[in-house]
Image: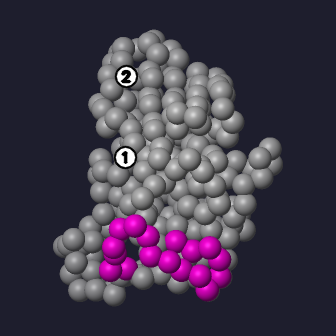
Amino acid sequence: QKEVEQNSGPLSVPEGAIASLNCTYSDRGSQSFFWYRQYSGKSPELIMFIYSNGDKEDGRFTAQLNKASQYVSLLIRDSQPSDSATYLCAVRDNYGQNFVFGPGTRLSVLP
Amino acid sequence: EADIYQTPRYLVIGTGKKITLECSQTMGHDKMYWYQQDPGMELHLIHYSYGVNSTEKGDLSSESTVSRIRTEHFPLTLESARPSHTSQYLCASSESVLRVGHNTGELFFGEGSRLTVL
């Protein structure tokens, strides 16, 4: 059973702080990794994807991937109240067939 | 912006009725998926398709059925709705092959269909 694990939270950070969200996965053959943001009552939207070990930055967001440790993280710098949402980690397997989602981490950015 | 559409967005219906949730995408994606999600809870895959005439059940057992007669269309049907079917249903699609540097291989979601069965 392929698994993706995340802390369910809620994770509370003050406005302007760095929010750090973590995700581990069980399938060593996983090739691509995604972070989705989901506001309450809305559908998930992609905010970051990463394929290679290391860091990938896009604006205030940085994704970090360590395939040896089977670990992917998302850093949100200068957190804003509008970042308050559930963040879903998703992993696409080696054959590109299906996606496995984690349970999501609820982030609350306090003004 | 993703070109994947779901109708209806909201549906309130009585027990025993037959319903069909529509999902269409204009991106030419071979792969399409249906997820079920209760408020504040995890996404659960209930059906997926790798192409025309291909359908598979997902991880979560569901009394719904799907069909894939055309690439762009992946409707979900409940023959007899029950209150336990009350949930949000999310349709999604993706490209078949990940081409690093050419596509993201991501899953594109529709806006969802919120079903309430009384």
Q: Residue at x 44, y 12 (%)?
A: A17
Residue A49: percent from the left, percent from the top?
63, 40
Residue at x 69%, y 36% (from the top left corner): A52
Identify the residue under disc 2. A109
Can residue A25 be seen by looking at this rendering? yes
**Residue located at (35% from left, 58% from top):** B37
Residue linked to disc 1: A103
Within 10 Å of disc 1 (Cα), the crowding (few <14, some 14-19, many 20+) is many
* Residue B92 point in image, percent of width and height: 54, 62
Compare marks 1 and 2 and give the one earlier in the sequence. Answer: 1
Which residue in the rendered view is the most extreme toward the right? Answer: B102
Residue B116 in sight in this render:
no
Q: Which residues are magenta?
A: B48-64
Whether residue B11 sits left or right of residue A96 in the image: it is: left
User: Is the C terminus of chain B in the top left, top right, bottom left or bottom right quadrant?
Assistant: bottom left
What distance separates the C-alpha of mark 1 from that of mark 2? 19 Å
Secondary structure state at the residue bearing disc 1: loop
